[in-house]
Image (spheres, rainbow, N blue to C red):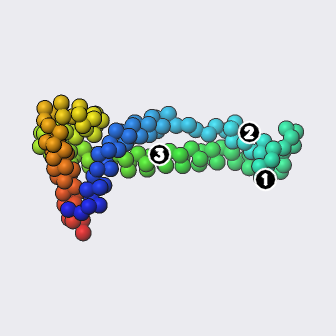
């Protein structure tokens, strides 16, 4: 088993809770996208100058008027790009989480319980010892064996892809 794979599995387990939150936030963003409105596009174009200096309210250049004619297309393009970026990130995180969840489901009952307590519920080692009803030494050994088992699963799939 490669040390890199073991380190990767540990990082996946330790970031499990954060990844779950990120997935939930990205789902929310897809359901409630922050769209650039036509008014915002026109306002941004009419109040800004290429060098970042603002113009007086009464002056609108020909260049700004030309851009303003295409504001709807620009706004739609920006909104689509935002949705695409969110979707790409969401798919990637969900694939990582689904693979980890599947591998966890293949563990034995004690290992699953350890992963649930230590990484998903984020209990301390002391609390995990109480939940499992085992000594600190036994829980550390079980944790190491669990990480090794998951790393072997990841290595197995990696070897089959070659």
Mark 1–mark 3 Cα distance, whole angstroms, equals 30 Å
Position of 138 with respect to 48 (left or right) is left
Mark 3 or mark 2: which comes first in sequence?
2
Of residue 24 and residue 153, the one placed in the foreground of this image is 153
x, y percentage for residue 77? 59, 48
Residue located 86% across and 40% down the image: 56
Q: Is residue 102 visible?
A: yes
The quadrant in which the C terminus is found is bottom left
Identify the residue under disc 2. Answer: 43
Residue 107: percent from the left, percent from the top? 15, 45
Query: Which mark is first along the chain, 2 or 1?
Result: 2
* Residue 43 left/right relative to 21: right
Q: Residue at x 58, y 38 (%)?
A: 35
Q: CA distance from mark 1 to mark 2?
A: 16 Å
Disc sitting over residue 70 in the figure:
none
Residue 51, numbered label: 1
The disc, 1 or 3, on the residue closer to the chain's N-terminal end is 1
Residue placed under numbered mark 3 in the picture: 86
**Residue 1 vs residue 36, the one in the foreground:** 1
Q: CA distance from mark 3 to mark 2?
A: 26 Å
For the residue labelled by badge 1, is the local secondary structure a helix, a strand or a loop? loop
Residue farthest bottom in this picture: 162
The residue at the point 17 percent across, 39 percent down is: 136
Q: Is residue 136 above or below residue 7?
A: above
Please tell me whether mark 3 sits on a helix, a strand or a loop: helix
Image coordinates of residue 72 in percent, x first then y, are: 65, 43
Crowd around label 3: few <14 · some 14–19 · many ≥20 (10 Å)? some
Please say if 135 is above or below 73: above
Which one is closest to the eye, mark 1 or mark 3? 1
Residue 89 percent location from the top left of the image? 43, 48
């Amino acid at each position: 088993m490669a040390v890199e794979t073991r380190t990767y599995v540990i990082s996946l387990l330790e970031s499990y809770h954060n990844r779950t939150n990120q997935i939930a936030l990205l789902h929310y963003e897809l359901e409630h996208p922050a769209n650039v409105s036509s008014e915002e596009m026109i306002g941004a174009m009419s109040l800004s100058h290429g060098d970042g200096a603002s113009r007086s309210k009464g002056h609108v250049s020909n260049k700004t008027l030309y851009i303003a004619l295409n504001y709807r297309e620009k706004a739609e393009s920006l909104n689509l790009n935002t949705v695409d970026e969110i979707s790409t990130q969401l798919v990637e995180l969900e694939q990582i989480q689904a693979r980890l969840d599947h591998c966890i489901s293949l563990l034995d009952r004690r290992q699953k319980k350890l992963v649930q307590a230590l990484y998903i519920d984020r209990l301390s080692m002391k609390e995990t010892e109480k939940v499992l009803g085992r000594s600190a030494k036994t829980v550390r050994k079980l944790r190491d064996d669990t990480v090794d088992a998951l790393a072997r699963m990841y290595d197995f799939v990696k070897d089959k892809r070659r």
